[in-house]
Image (tube, helix red, strand yellow):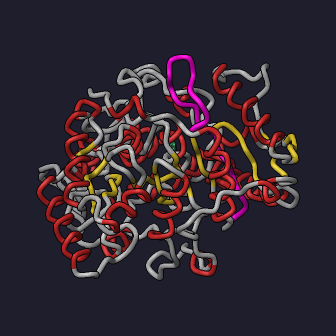
């Protein structure tokens, strides 16, 4: 059962092949077999089974709420749900309960989806390996010695290990796509403004988006269509989110539709440093595939390529330092017992935040400080507009841009933990997408010699999610990952 996609489960539930209770039980069993992968901060079995019971009842009386009714969706632990703790994998929030639901959670509840566990992440979504979690190190289902990617590593590993059919992640600089690529699944970052950020604990608000993680492109579209939409409670959510709703049913492009599509490729060449052989090979396979479909392959060159990591790490840290100032020991989370207010602030923050979060706050405070604001923050804002302008320019005569999701496959746990610069390099291919605000999807494109999945990233113009899904589904047809071996693995 667990090998099936959410869309297949939906049909099976409709036909009465099995009940939602049977479905969630098989995923809970699977999650137990995969317990040592450390994917969940919390997985409340009885609540999940209760929710499945309620769904089965609705189905019996003909009151099915949506195609997702009765289907489990794992939730990254930085998205607020009143019924659960929202910890952001931080000691600061280890017992925090949100007084309200995030808009995406409201929508999933209204759709009858089963909210299935809280997945581990890098503390406050800052990282690329999930090693920055204050609670646990999540492991990659393809090789438990390796990281699942990050920051949505728990979500990616839960879907990749077949412990959940769907998950939500959040993506500020690649946190959905890079772990999706490391765990052999589909991960999608919507256009900025497509999905409400209300109830997503803010990291860098001008870049953050919530998005779907799934076993198939079809499932990702189904989940996105459920959570998207303009929301008055998020001033950056965009009216286009309603005007161009994502179709829950994907029609893979074929034949004439594919022929003549102009596809820009941003592929490394053999001289590019830091790229795995397997990633270069995936690029060759992708190029051959595009040519075979009759697509027009256009070499793209980004003039801003070498600047995107510095631009991102200035803007994201600046916004983080400002967003995280609300964690003062008074309003949220852990409070250090101190006799005066100043010490209370300082000690609460010192004890509550982990080292990477502190590094980001320091960097962000520095680039915003007087005397440096113009040189760093303002320059980075200007450069970011240039990245966006470059995308608009590219998409004047391109339908899609294709590039690897990450320069490498999943790396070993501990390998980059001591070297933040090497860690930040993992984000090279994903960051510009957030800076540009465009939608992008990562899907598996083969494996390396060790059986680790390689991910390919496809980017489309703003609000062209439907086309992105249709095109990606065509690619997926010819490259889908064989998961049969995964079912019998336990950890
Ligand atoms: N790895 C990037 C960072 O650490 C992106 C994180 C994210 O997308 N949340 O900032």
Q: Nearer the viewer, residue 100 or 462?
A: 462
Q: Nearer the viewer, residue 473 or 227?
A: 473
Residue 301's spot in the image, x, y percent?
84, 41
Residue 235 lies, in percent from the top left, at 52, 77
Q: Residue 2 vs residue 186: left or right?
A: left
Query: Residue sitting at 53 percent across and 57 percent down?
Result: 218
Q: Which residue is pictured at 79% across the width and 59% down the height?
A: 257
Q: Looking at this view, is 280 or 204 the one in front?
A: 280
Residue 219 image offset from top left, x and y in percent: 48, 57
Q: Which residue occupies 40% across, 29% down?
A: 485
Residue 364 appears anywhere in the view: no
Which region shows up in magenta?
444-462
Q: Is residue 215 above or below residue 83?
A: above
User: Does residue 267 appear anywhere in the picture?
Assistant: yes
Q: Is residue 442 above or below residue 384?
A: above
Front position in the image: 382 or 374: 382
Residue 471 relative to residue 416: left or right: right
In the figure, is residue 336 to the left or right of 463? left
User: Farthest residue toward the top?
Assistant: 449
- Image quarter where the C terminus lies is top left
The percent position of residue 230, horizontal first and vertical second, equals: 52, 78
8 vs 425: above or below: below
């Amino acid at each position: 059962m667990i090998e099936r996609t959410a869309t297949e489960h939906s049909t099976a539930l409709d036909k009465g092949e099995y009940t939602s209770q049977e479905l969630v039980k098989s995923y809970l069993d699977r999650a137990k077999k995969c317990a040592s992968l450390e994917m969940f901060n919390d997985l409340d079995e009885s609540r999940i089974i209760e929710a499945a019971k309620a769904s089965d009842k609705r189905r019996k009386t003909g009151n099915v709420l949506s195609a997702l009714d009765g289907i489990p969706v794992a939730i990254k632990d930085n998205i607020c749900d009143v019924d659960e703790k929202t910890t952001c994998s931080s000691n600061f929030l280890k017992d925090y309960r949100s007084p309200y639901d995030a808009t995406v959670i409201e929508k999933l509840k209204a759709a009858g989806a089963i909210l299935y566990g809280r997945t581990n992440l890098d503390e406050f979504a800052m990282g690329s390996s999930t090693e920055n979690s204050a609670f646990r190190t999540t492991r990659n289902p393809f090789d438990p010695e390796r990281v699942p990617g990050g920051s949505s590593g728990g979500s990616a590993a839960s879907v990749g290990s077949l412990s959940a059919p769907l998950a939500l992640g959040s993506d500020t600089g690649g946190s959905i796509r890079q772990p999706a690529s490391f765990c052999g699944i589909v991960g999608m970052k919507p256009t900025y403004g497509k999905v409400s950020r209300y109830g997503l604990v803010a990291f860098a608000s001008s870049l953050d988006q919530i998005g779907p993680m799934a076993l198939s492109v079809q499932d990702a579209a189904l989940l996105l269509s459920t959570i998207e939409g303009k929301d008055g409670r998020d001033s950056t959510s965009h009216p286009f989110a309603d005007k161009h709703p994502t179709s829950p049913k994907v029609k893979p492009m074929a034949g004439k539709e594919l022929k003549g599509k102009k596809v820009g490729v941003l592929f490394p060449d053999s001289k590019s440093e830091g790229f795995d052989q397997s990633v270069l090979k995936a690029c060759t396979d992708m190029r051959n595939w595009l040519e075979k479909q009759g697509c027009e392959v256009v070499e793209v060159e980004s003039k801003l390529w070498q600047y995107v990591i510095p631009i991102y790490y200035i803007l994201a840290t600046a916004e983080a330092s400002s967003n995280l100032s609300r964690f003062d020991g008074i309003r949220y989370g852990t409070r250090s017992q101190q006799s005066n207010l100043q010490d209370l602030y300082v000690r609460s923050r010192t004890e509550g935040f982990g080292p990477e979060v502190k590094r980001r706050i320091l960097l962000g405070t520095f680039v915003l400080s007087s005397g440096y604001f113009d040189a760093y923050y303002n320059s980075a804002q200007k450069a970011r507009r240039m990245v966006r302008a470059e995308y608009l320019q590219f998409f004047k005569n391109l339908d899609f841009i294709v590039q690897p999701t990450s320069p490498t496959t999943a790396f070993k746990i501990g390998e980059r933990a001591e070297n933040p610069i090497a860690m930040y390099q993992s984000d090279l291919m994903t960051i510009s997408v957030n800076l540009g605000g465009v939608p992008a999807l990562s899907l598996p494109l083969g494996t390396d010699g060790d059986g680790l999945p390689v991910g390919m990233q496809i980017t489309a113009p703003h609000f062209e999610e439907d086309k992105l899904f249709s095109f990606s589904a065509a690619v997926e047809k010819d490259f889908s990952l064989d998961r049969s071996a995964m079912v019998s693995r336990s950890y």
